């Protein structure tokens, strides 16, 4: 899903956005209707890995873990999945009008367990405690391409960060701040010291920052040229318990191969998955309690423990599709997998506590 997002961004007009103040209010819309479709699950178990698959007729594009629920999107629709029952409820957008070419790019849950979504050509929406969708207002938007929200980050302190083509926005209670960047923002992450890390890509711009850290006051740009390649763009960033960044790094939109990149603030390490230089894309990264890195890729679900690679695909596992858009790991250690042919849950029942 990340790769598709990158191609869609490529065709947008890249215009420099000057800073502006946002003093408008959210527009609250009537309560949306909710329906519960007849979606049931079928389960498959093999040895120590227990796979449970859901909704094989749906392409799941993005996921968010919200305690008892998984919120997921299918490109243009939003569902709330109840873990205990294995059923999903559809949430429509009420009276919000979307352009015909809109696509939901991401979904996240805030510290109150409420979903936020980003949509191309539309912007950012959040759900209220009353179950109403609100479309957040936008200022200094010159064309429809600048309206699209591509990434959302929920900070530990509840701050919401969103990104458009080249603007980063910070929502703190009723205050909104905007920042401009030298590239298209394609990934966001927060480290253990509450610094914000930003991955940018060049696309139609003459230059880009690559990897950027914002500590609340200062911006620091990190150059990855010491990895032996030209500066990398990072379409996924996650931080482990030691504060080390793990990223999906690639050399541009025409690069058919993505590497796993490690950065501790000083040193870079690049790990190449064993796919013999075949087209390989890492969409998202998740890290489990043992420090294993799980990658959603176009070749299936890939695990890396620091020295060994394991690939789970349709030929050796119960995963429903080799096209994996996103993965998240919940507090119980269950890996939730968004694929081209439904939602899958992987539980390592033989894992020691």
Image (spheres, grey):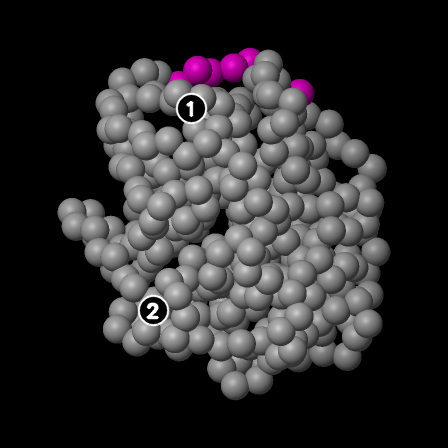
Which residue bears the numbered disc 2? 225
The location of residue 207, given as percent across then percent down, is 34, 49
Quadrant where the C terminus sits is bottom right
Q: Dot 2: what SS?
A: helix
Horizontally, residue 279 falls left or right of residue 238, namely right
Q: What residue sits 63% from the left and 62% below the top?
A: 297
**Residue drawn at (75%, 32%), measured in percent from left and top?**
36
Toward the viewer: 249 or 136?
Answer: 249
The kind of secondary structure the magenta stretch mainly shows is: loop
Residue 14 position in % (x across, y down): 41, 34
Residue placed farthest to the front in the image?
Answer: 206
Pointer 1 with pointer 2, Cβ within 8 A: no
Residue range highlighted in magenta: 26-33
Q: Is residue 233 visible?
A: yes
Query: Which element carries disc 1, helix, strand or loop?
Result: loop
Please indicate whether residue 8 sits to the left or right of residue 159 in the image: right
Q: Is residue 167 left or right of residue 305?
A: left
Q: Residue at x 37, y 63 (%)?
A: 231
Q: CA separation, marks 1 and 2?
A: 38 Å
Total numbered labels: 2
Query: According to the image, label 1 marks what residue?
Result: 136
**Disc 2 crowd, CA 10 A, few/some/many (<14, 14-19, 20+):** few
Q: Is residue 224 above or below residue 92?
A: below
The answer to which quarter of the image holds residue 167 is top left
Asked whether 27 or 8 is in front, the reply is 8
- Residue 284 locus on image (x, y percent): 54, 58
């Amino acid at each position: 899903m990340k790769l598709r997002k990158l191609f869609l961004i490529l065709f947008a007009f890249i215009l420099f956005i000057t800073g502006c103040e946002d003093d408008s209010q959210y527009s609250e819309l009537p309560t949306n209707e909710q329906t519960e479709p007849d979606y049931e699950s079928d389960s498959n178990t093999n040895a120590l890995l227990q796979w449970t698959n859901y909704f094989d007729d749906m392409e799941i594009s993005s996921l968010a873990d919200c305690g008892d629920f998984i919120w997921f999107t299918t490109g243009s629709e939003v569902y709330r999945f109840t873990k205990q029952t294995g059923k999903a409820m559809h949430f429509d957008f009420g009276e919000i009008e979307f352009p015909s070419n809109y696509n939901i790019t991401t979904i996240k849950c805030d510290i109150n367990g409420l979903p936020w979504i980003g949509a191309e050509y539309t912007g950012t929406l959040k759900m209220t405690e009353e179950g109403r969708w609100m479309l957040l207002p936008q200022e200094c938007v010159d064309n429809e391409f600048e309206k699209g929200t591509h990434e959302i980050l929920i900070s530990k302190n509840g701050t919401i960060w969103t990104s458009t083509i080249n603007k980063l926005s910070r929502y703190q209670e009723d205050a909104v701040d905007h920042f401009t960047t030298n590239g298209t923002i394609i990934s966001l992450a927060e480290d253990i010291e509450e610094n914000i890390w930003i991955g940018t890509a060049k696309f139609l711009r003459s230059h880009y920052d690559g990897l950027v850290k914002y500590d609340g006051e200062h911006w620091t740009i990190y150059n990855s040229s010491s990895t032996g390649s030209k500066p990398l763009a990072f379409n996924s960033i996650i931080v482990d318990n030691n504060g080390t960044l793990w990223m999906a790094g690639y050399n541009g939109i025409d690069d058919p191969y993505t590497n796993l990149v490690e950065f501790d603030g000083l040193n870079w390490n690049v790990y190449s998955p064993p796919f013999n230089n075949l087209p390989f894309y890492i969409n998202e990264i998740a890290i489990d309690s043992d420090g294993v890195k799980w990658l959603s890729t176009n070749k299936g679900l890939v695990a890396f423990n620091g020295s060994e690679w394991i690939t789970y695909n349709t030929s050796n596992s119960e995963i429903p599709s080799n096209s994996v858009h996103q993965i998240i790991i919940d507090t119980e250690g269950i890996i939730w997998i968004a694929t081209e042919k439904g939602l899958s849950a992987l539980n390592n029942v033989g894992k020691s506590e």
